[in-house]
Amino acid sequence: MVEAAKITDLTHDAPFESQYEEIDELLSKKQFYKEGFITNTNVETFAKGINEDVVRAISEKKNEPQWMLDFRLKALKVWQSMEEPHWAKAEYEPLDYQDYSYYSAPECGSCAGECNTDEAGEPEIDPEVAKAFAELGVPIEGNSEVAVDAIFDSISVSTTKREELAKLGIIFCSFSEAVQDYPDLVQKYIATVVPVGDNYFAALNSAVASDGTFVYVPEGVHCPIELSTYFRINEAKTGQFERTILIAEKGSYVSYLEGCSAPVRDTYQLHAAVVEVIVHEDAEVKYSTVQNWYPGDEDCHGGILNFVTKRGICEGDNSKLSWTQAETGSAITWKYPSCILKGDNSIGEFYSVALTNRHQQADTGTKMIHIGKNTKSTIISKGLSAGFSDNTYRGLVKILPSAEGARNFTQCDSMLIGDKCGAHTFPYIEVGNSSAQMEHEATTSRIGEDQLFYCQQRGISEQDAISMIVNGFCKDVFSELPLEFAQEAEELLAISLEGSVG
Amino acid sequence: MLLKVENLHAEIDDKEIIKGLNLEIKPGEIHAIMGPNGAGKSTLANVLVGRDEYEVTDGSIEFDGEDLDELDPEERAHKGMFLAFQYPVEIPGVSNKFFMQTAVNAVRNERGQPELDMFEFDEFAKEKIELLDMRSDLLDRSVNVGFSGGEKKRNDIFQMALLEPKLCIMDETDSGLDIDALKLVANGVNSLRSPDRSFIVVTHYQRLLDYIKPDYVHVLYDGKIVKSGGFELGQQLEEQGYDEIIRHYHNG
Ligand SMILES: Nc1ncnc2c1ncn2[C@@H]1O[C@H](COP(=O)(O)OP(=O)(O)O)[C@@H](O)[C@H]1O
Ligand SMILES: [Mg+2]
């Protein structure tokens, strides 16, 4: 039984034209994207194009073992046999994949790019790159409560707190290092949650995977600090193909965060990531994302194309996986963090705020696949559209016949700011077991002129009023983010909505 | 003079609603404005506080010696104008307390006073709640969401108390209130009365005026003030209605 619970499609035909002129004007002021600076440093960038030689060269650059090269080559073949998907509610011209570079990395001054990890410890970080991360507020010196893996274009440049974590048996390193140092673990888990041929972008990622983070939390260990990765795309016309694997062994706990940004460029940059999360019995993983990729300018030039496959499996009984995301950037977002609830009593959660402004297009949501008995999932999605943007929630809740006593609660709220944007909701439900309990709530609202006037009459400026109302709307999701990230997300929203700040 | 409205003409959607209105209010005075439905009372209130959709086509509004023509609604609020709405607006997800702390600090900023932090605001709010005899749990709920009609009106009065305006405009704050709620609102107003705070009380009913005792009563009809008098004019209207005055206006 396939059924779309309630499809709402609220588009550009809003009846109140004049009322929103002012708001539109306010929102169309040039957005202030403070992460938009460019780092100039010596980089090694492959010539544009993708083919077997490029894939071999990437693998060689990273000094990879044969099995990893074989994995890539197989994926390339799969990718070449597939077609670019265009079913999402985001419109984009077919991309010319030969017009992107698939590897770019800063050369580190001392050893001209030849340095692999060695016993002497971390290689020197390119000072320009270090400066860029400092400016972004990413603590790559290890002087923070949070452990950080900092990724610049195709490579990881620094991973902090690893010794501290190693004492607990926690592995926290870049994906490339894991391939070298923990080949058994990587081989055991890679492509088990997201198979190579899962979708077009997953296949592409598998072929040209650049860097990402590898996390392994051993049995019974409660990771005492937040682990995080910061992704920075710097070079023009390059792709970043993050590959992240996170494994939580029996009874363990970890909270992982990722942040991202890119300079202001007038051409598209491509980000096609694959994230796989494996949660064993009684373990819990919290995975939070604050996504602030460059959204492109007023006239739809540039921005990040963000095609992401994030999926986790609650493998063991009583395991739990939560995805929380605040998506404010990217020209196009195509992303559905999902949970496969295989273990009995396992729990999947998805909390999302997606904001689109100007000409951004976001098609995001989640899939909750219930396999085990008494599995529970919660979906709370808050979509905010402003400017000329389109914001789509697309979700699937699938209850397999084996999932006796499964429960889902879905709440999808959309808020429109102005009258030239669109909000769309496509919640699909497939129920294969009659004992399932499903609850679905959805609302669509518009920031009303009357609300703004009420605030203004009390002395609050229109901009402050908008961000106050918007933050109120997003509260249920922000409360799921770790504290400092919640604040960052609130600020991001405010900046994304306001014209310029300060 | 706190407020001086001269020959005011204002329209909405190209329809003229206020058609040459004059009104003068001194500090500390209470003026009641009465009149039949559709006379333009809410329009006048909105025009005074600068709502965008309303366009002033002629005449002037002077507040505290300054022409308001170019000022945005929030600037007028900072100068001390307050409107208690005929229909207070709901803002889901935003707590009443956070909303009012933001508002109070915006106004204090403008007046060159230091902002109140959470603790200072709590203290300040507590005083006002006691003054108005309000339930303090309203502070923790979203602005006006799930409030009863009476609670919404009382919340507006509470906001008025917090913002300490010079001119309070109350648009039918008494409509839809039972007698107890009405008394609470009236007590609120009376306790906020001061020699340098003036009120414009828009109402249909004498009963609010019985509690508040305005200095002047005006009848608004067809976008103009067609009759003015003292407290006793309200009583007369209660007994005779507007017919006599309207007939007189059309014949005169
Ligand atoms: N948006 C609008 N467009 C056109 N006419 C309006 C609009 N809003 C109010 N009016 C008209 O203005 C007149 C005065 O309305 P209002 O000020 O609300 O009266 P009152 O508060 O005295 O009952 C009414 O005739 C009403 O129909
Ligand atoms: Mg009215």
Image (cartoon, coloured by chain):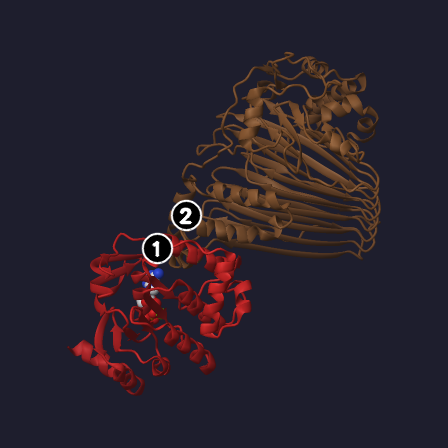
Chain colours: A brown, B red
Amino acid type indicated by mark 2: Ile
- Report in which chain the residue with disc 1 lies: B
**Residue A429 in the image: above or below residue B96:** above
Residues flagged by tags 1 and 2 on a common chain: no
Of labels 1 and 2, the one closer to you: 1
Q: In the shown orientation, is residue A469 left or right of residue B170?
A: right
Q: Nearer the viewer, residue A85 or B129?
A: B129
Picture quadrant where residue B12 is located: bottom left
Left or right: where A280 falls relative to B87: right
Query: Which residue is label 1 attached to?
Result: B111
Residue A412 coordinates in the image, percent (x, y): 61, 51
Label 1 to label 2: alpha-carbon separation: 27 Å
Give residue A23's mark. Answer: 2
Q: Position of residue B206 (x, y in %)?
A: 34, 82
- What chain letter is assigned to the residue under label 2? A
**Residue appearing at x 42%, y 69% in the figure:** B157
Vertical order, B36 against A476 (above or below): below
Q: Nearer the viewer, residue B122 or B7?
A: B122
**A11 sits to left or right of A63:** left
Q: Is residue A193 visible?
A: yes
Q: Could you say where residue B131 lies in the image, as x and y percent from the top left?
A: 45, 73
Q: What's the residue type where badge 1 is placed?
A: Arg
Residues at circles 1 and 2 in contact by the CB criterion of under 8 Å: no
Q: Residue at x 34, y 57 (%)?
A: B78
Identify the residue at horizontal 40%, vertical 73% (top origin): B173
Question: How many other residues sit within 10 Å of disc 2, few (<14), some (14-19) or many (≥20)?
Answer: many
Q: Secondary structure at mark 1?
A: loop
Q: Is mark 1 within 8 Å of ligand 2?
A: no
Indicate whether B137 appears above or below A25: below
Q: Quadrant of residue B47?
A: bottom left
